[in-house]
Image (cartoon, helix red, strand yellow):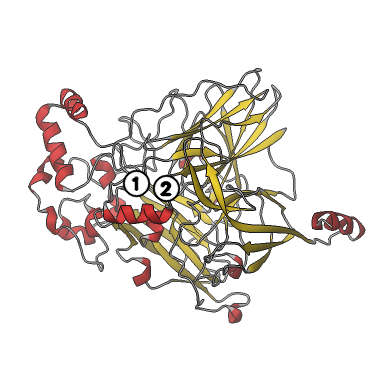
Amino acid sequence: MNMRFLAGVFGLLLPGLVLAGEYNLTVDRVEIDTGDFVKEGIGYNGASPGPVLRFKEGENVRINVTNNLDETTSIHWHGLILPFDQDGVPGISFPGIQPGETFTYEFPIQQAGTYWFHSHSGFQEPDGAYGAIVIEPEKREPFRYDREYVVQLTDKHPHSGDRIMRNLKMMPDYYNREQQTVGEFFSDASKNGLMNTVRDRMAWGDMRMMKADVEDIHGFTGLINGKGPDQNWTGLFEPGERIRLRFINSSAMTYFDVRIPGLDMTVVQADGNNVQPVSVDEFRIGVAETYDVIVRPRDEQAYTIFAESMGRSGYARATLAPEDGMEAAVPQLREAARLTMADMGGMPGMDHGSMSGMDHGNMEMSSADGMEHSSMGSMNHGTMKNMDHSAMSGMDHGSMSMGSEGKSDPFYARGSGLVPEAANGGKFLSYADLKAQDPLYEDREPTREIELRLTGNMERYTWSINGVKYEDADPIRLKYGERVRFKFVNETMMTHPMHLHGMWSILDVGAGQWNPIKHTVSVQPGTTVYMETEVDEPGQWAFHCHLSYHAAAGMFRKVIVEGGPGSAQVKTNVIGEEGGEA
């Protein structure tokens, strides 16, 4: 008999008694058809994406996971607050689920909102092992809607995750299809002058880097709820209805800029937590983030949900319509984004043209300095380890102003080529717009600060924290009950979505007690971002960049929370598969 039915019956007979909802998941080899190509992948209950799991705040859940693969698997419940041994990270939380084995996850549901689940073993997640979670709140929502849809984004590539990683290690720009052209050189020369353009090209060439290195992986097909652009997933509505769209970015590597031409969007949740409503025309959703928005189509017509990659190398598309079969125009991809010296951490007023005379062959720093060649924003690389990165233009978000020249956003370096701009010239969501609806924690001073420099070597395709890869790093040790302020200093030219398991991340947008609560914080090139964590969950946790191939290449840490309830039962080592995969 259905466990939810039984829970409802006993709940009526015995008010206050909350029984477990029980779910069964199988992990299977599946066929994935994107409309552009068909490939073998991994899914749940015979499909990718897996089913939408629906929980209710306050209940206890039991999820039986049967591994039908010939390799170890796992499921991580992304963004859920739960006991560490139910978090699903092999080598950190548990040994993993062996072939043919059934593992039962059991945990209380302590929150509401939009979340997702995915494998934390190897590259099973980019190969298709992901699904959505929707949690109904105990109390009424502070906003109204008439119907809802999950809109789960991903970037599906014809190559397997293992093959992609091998190719990146062999040639980091293997998948880059946005190389600069001769035509672009002459266009830049016309706009900026011949000598300035030559100097600029020489500087980037000497760094062995490219302005086009915005995304590591091109050649993917963007999917929404498992459907490619030509397959056109469609959500139906009645004109005048308020529709809640639960956006989830389950991509391996792709940031998406999302808009629905003809409709305003009101952002009401970020990473499952209610925020004060913000009306926007477009928003950027980082890998692993979720945003809930309300739209209200009043006309009897179709609307295109258009999710364009940050590097403009691909897109996902779906439709909202009053009837099946209706479609709206699909926008063209905008001009490809280009990195600037600001994204390299360049100081204002610096003569970047002089970089052409530098000896970049000896740029790689020792792991003790944690710089490697990604730290090239300062021209005097011998002194970079002593630099106060928070003083750099566009970096210290605790005190930074917007500036008056050109496009600007306090979470991007001033002059960055990645600053988002709405296609219609309207409002583009910034982290600075996010304010908590109800503070989750009291506003108090952090007990200490931990600096995490995001580092890497693009030529060798290694990624690290403080210059040390996961396998060589000591764990980060926290004490139960403290509040820790994390300072992210991005010394690379790539954007990194940093995800701390098991505890909330309070993103510092300068709003004090109204700072938003998130589980994934995106850190742009050449910037410093702060977040605080109330250390309230004992055990061992993963902390990593959620770009799959960055985590696998070393941008990963184990966090150990010492003390707290049940601390005597917390094991400090878990024997099994290593947890260094996204």
- Note whether residue 490 is visible: no
Q: Quadrant of residue 356?
A: top left
| Residue 380 numbered tag | none
Measuring 50% from the left and 56% from the top, which residue is drawn there?
124
| Residue position marked by numbered label 2 in the rendering | 253
**Label 2 amino acid?**
Met
Measuring 84% from the left and 60% from the top, which residue is drawn there?
16
Q: Earlier in the sequence, mark 1 or mark 2?
A: 1
| Residue position marked by numbered label 1 in the rendering | 216
Tag 2 secondary structure = loop
**Label 1 amino acid?**
Asp
207 or 251: nearer the viewer: 251
- Note whether residue 272 is visible: yes
Circles 1 and 2 in contact, beta carbons < 8 Å: yes
The N terminus lies in which quarter of the figure? bottom right
How far across and how far down the image is residue 362, in percent? 13, 59
Question: Is 14 drawn above or below residue 261 in the view shown?
Answer: below
Answer left or right for 375 relative to 507: left
